[in-house]
Amino acid sequence: MTAANGTSNGNGATRKSIRAPNPPLKDSVFDMFRLDGKTAIITGGSGGIGYEIARALAEAGANIAIWYAHSKKAHALAETIASDFNVKVKAYQVAVEDYAAVEQGVAAVVDEFGRLDIMIANAGIPTKAGGLDDLVEDWNKVRAIDFDGAYYCARAAGLVFKKQGSGNCIFTASMSGHAANVPQEQSCYNACKAGVIHLAKSLAVEWAKWGGRVNCVSPGYIDTAISGDCPFEMKEEWFSLTPLKRDADPRELKAAYLYLASDASTYTTGADIVVDGGYTCR
């Protein structure tokens, strides 16, 4: 005979199980993807990938805080999302490489929206040179935004999540955390993204004991402003090494982030979803 919180040993005594309870779930898979009443921060939210993530979560019902560094259009984009999906959206200028600024930004969002459920640490900048050619100050800048900034966002949000006993952090990593891209040389970026992937796995184990989840998405080549100034010949080599022979529209990433942000993924933590057109599986 099995007890609700344990199993019988055959002599009538019941052993207490360490098994955690299952979360309440909807029967409809479409309902599982809804985010009604939840609040999400998306860093780098005015850029190509970040903006599409914001739209995806807003379409699913979430209220959105867009964080940006220097964008002149962030507030207009926030208004567009709010109008399109009838949710609350606000833009905040936050330097993710400054932990004090990140803490203040999280506090401002909680104060404005009343809660925080999802942190999407998406902000990042590329490396422009290889490991020996890179200036040390450029290395430090990329690391500060791409790796330190990702951790700072997870930490500040995680402290809120831990108090409330739930929360969800999603990092934007990269296929460059799995492979050294060619022909461009970008050791710093590659190393930072590999670090983000392992940071997600490490935090996932640590946060699980109080109900938090941590995952990441690793995009491949995406048609955004970051790659807009790359030479034609470089892009042709990228396409030749990508089985699908193209880069991606940033909208092709939306479903991966929505899955990880929603109750459709309540048993998914420490995962890295690679969306790279087959580049890393060659």
Image: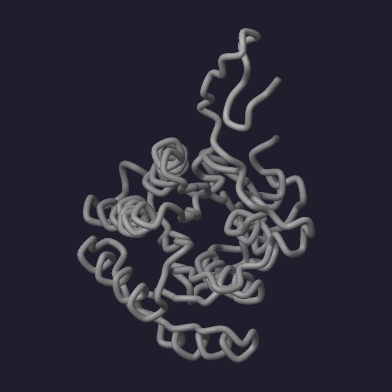
Residue, x 31% and y 58% (percent of image)?
Answer: 156
Q: Quadrant of the C terminus?
A: top right
Who is closer to the viewer here, 36 or 258? 36
Q: How many marks?
A: 0
Residue 37 picture location, percent across and down: 55, 73
Whether residue 213 sits left or right of residue 140 in the image: it is right
Q: Is 47 rendered above or below residue 231?
A: below
User: Is residue 229 visible from the viewing direction of this image?
Assistant: yes
What residue sits 62% from the left and 59% below the top?
A: 262
- Residue plotted at (56% across, 63% down): 231
x and y percentages locating residue 201 in the rendered image:
46, 38
Point out residue 54 in the picture as x, y percentages from the top left corner: 56, 73
Viewer-proximal residue among 65 and 162: 162
Q: In x, y percent, where is residue 263?
A: 63, 56
Side of 4 relative to 26 (left or right): left
Can you see residue 128?
no
Q: Which quadrant holds the N terminus?
A: top right
Q: Is residue 136 left or right of residue 208?
A: left
Q: Nearer the viewer, residue 52 or 21?
A: 21
Which quadrant of the figure has residue 86?
Answer: bottom right
Q: Quadrant of residue 107?
A: bottom left
Residue at left offset 52%, top offset 40%? 270
| Residue at the farthest top position | 11
Residue at the farthest front position: 12
